[in-house]
Image (cartoon, rainbow, N blue to C red):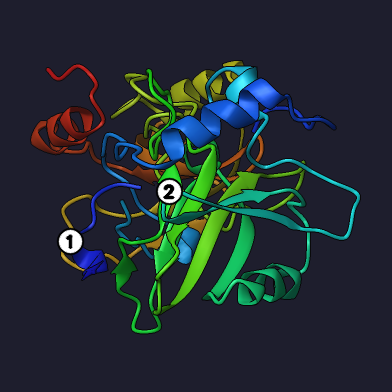
Amino acid sequence: MTDSIDQIVARFAAPPVSEVSEGARELMHEIAAGSPAPETGRTGRRRGRVAVVAGGLLTTAVVALTWMLPNSTATALDIKKEGGYYIIEIKDLYADPENYETQLRTVGLDVSLKVVPATAAFEGQVFPTAPDNEYVTEIQGIYPPGPCEKLDGCAIGLKIPVGFKGTAKVEVGRKARPGEQFQSTTSWDAKGEPMHCVPYYNKTVAEVRTMLRERGVSIEEFIVADPNRTDALDYDKQDSVPDSWLVHGGSMTEPGRASVDVYSTPMPQRFIDNINKANGCPTS
């Protein structure tokens, strides 16, 4: 089954370790057969300022061990068959995608896998699409029970039905290394991001720069755009703007660096309330 990406409104690494405990593996196996979908929220991929509506890992260390585990061996994936699914762990986050694909082909899956540097909200995100760019619902992340502070849920694995006969491309988000540009990102106030529920809207550039600095973030660029515009691509990119201009939003471009949306006039309060509501934050 597939759903149009235009209809999808949803869709998050612990420090590297060298071993996986049996208890951690058992936990993943117990929940692999029937994991609930993560709570949804406002999302978007914003490289080049083009938003793509698409739909994290802040959980216990034990749970994190079974997912996104660097490994020095030649085996990039660990694939097991359980409960009618192929249960997949990524053991080498930096392997060539061809290595992933070769292993998936050995179990009869016409699936390609790419692991990309992602902003905090999308670390661990499992995003599968068909050749026509439709979202593939049969391929899912594995989500542990309990609360999660990531936009896309705290995935600890990936599962694909044993009988899956389609063709799919799966993108998985990983923690970015210092200086590495994000390939999967969202608004900086989404769940799991540094400005989540921070009351920065219509604050001056000077005020928001201080807020960001307190969170270890510096400004890389400014996107000048009228919040009332009808064309989403009607904007200018600038290296600097007056400190008195007002901030309407932003996104992370790499660890510790952000792109900031600004304009000389304030954003309407109704827009702010709608965004805060979608993010689960207080409204006016």
Q: Earlier in the sequence, mark 1 or mark 2?
A: 1
Asked if the residues shown at circle 1 and circle 2 are in contact, with their CB atoms under 8 angstroms apart, the answer is no
Q: Is residue 53 left or right of residue 28?
A: left
* Residue 152, placed above or below residue 131: above
Residue 141 at what x, y percent from top left? Answer: 44, 47
Quickly name the residue at label 2.
83
Q: Circle 2 sits in a helix, a strand or a loop, which is it?
A: loop
Residue lying at 34% horizontally and 40% vertically, measured from the top left: 34
Regarding residue 57, the answer to whether it shows in the image is no
Which of the two residues, 91 or 25, is positioned nearer the viewer here? Answer: 25
Quickly name the residue at label 1.
7
Residue 21 at what x, y percent from top left? Answer: 73, 24
Which label lies toward us, 1 or 2? 2
Residue 200 at what x, y percent from top left? Answer: 35, 24
Q: Residues within 10 Å of mark 2 (few under 14, many from 20)?
A: few
The three-letter amino acid code for the residue at tag 2 is Gly
Residue lying at 47% horizontally and 44% vertically, measured from the top left: 251
Q: Is residue 16 left or right of residue 234?
A: right
- Mark linked to residue 119: none
Quadrant position of the N terminus in the picture: bottom left
Q: Circle 1 sits in a helix, a strand or a loop, which is it?
A: helix
The three-letter amino acid code for the residue at tag 1 is Gln
Residue lying at 35% horizontally and 52% vertically, measured from the top left: 44
* Residue 43, placed above or below residue 192: below
Q: Is residue 127 left or right of residue 79?
A: left
* Residue 106, placed above or below residue 38: below
Residue 12 at what x, y percent from top left? Answer: 49, 38
Q: Is residue 25 left or right of residue 109?
A: right
Distance Cα–Cα, label 1 vs label 2: 29 Å
Q: Residues within 10 Å of mark 1 (few under 14, many from 20)?
A: few
Regarding residue 39, the answer to whether it shows in the image is yes
